[in-house]
Image: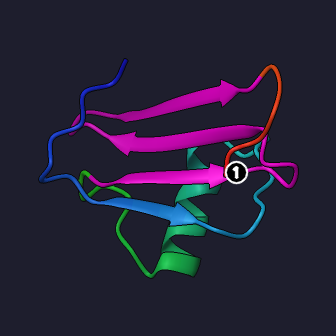
Amino acid sequence: MLSIPSTIRIYLHTQPTDLRKGADGLCGVIRGQFQGDPQDGSLFLFFNRRRDRVKMLHWDGTGYWIYYKTLESGTFE
């Protein structure tokens, strides 16, 4: 379970994303689509086309964390 402070902003990319992208590729999406800074401490969430997988990118001050979740059944709403 992740504990997320209420001061952290969470951005959701609503268009399907190729989840084969690593940190560099996702940073490119953040800069291009969000016009944002991937190193500002925010959480950035990306879903695949079927919405049964999610990838989250987070900068902790020393490097990127990538969290990845695959649902066994169902989809993210």
Residue at left offset 77%, top offset 41%: 75
Residue 36 percent location from the top left of the image: 38, 74
The quadrant where residue 60 appears? top left
* 54 magenta-colored: yes
Q: Residue furthest right?
A: 50
Name the residue type under label 1: Phe
Is residue 74 located in the magenta-colored stretch of the structure?
no
Q: For this view, does 67 lie left or right of residue 74?
A: left
Q: Is residue 65 above or below residue 30?
A: above
- Looking at the picture, tell me which residue is in the foreground, 66 or 9: 9
Residue density around tag 1, few if under 14, some if 14–19, many if 20 or more, within 10 Å: many
Name the quarter where the N terminus is drawn.
top left
Main secondary structure of the magenta stretch:
strand
Per the rendered image, the range of residues in magenta is: 42-71
The spot of residue 21 in percent (x, y) is 72, 46
From the viewer's side, name the closer residue of 12 and 17.
Answer: 12
- Say above or below: 77 vs 16: above
Q: Position of residue 73 (x, y in %)?
A: 83, 25
Residue 36 placement, left or right of 67: left
Q: Which residue is mark 1?
A: 47
Q: Residue at x 64, y 27 (%)?
A: 69
Task: Work out whether residue 60 or residue 16 is closer to the camera in this orientation and state it.
Answer: 16
Q: Is residue 24 left or right of residue 3?
A: right
Determine the secondary structure under disc 1. Answer: strand
In the image, residue 64 sits, relative to residue 7, either above or below, namely above
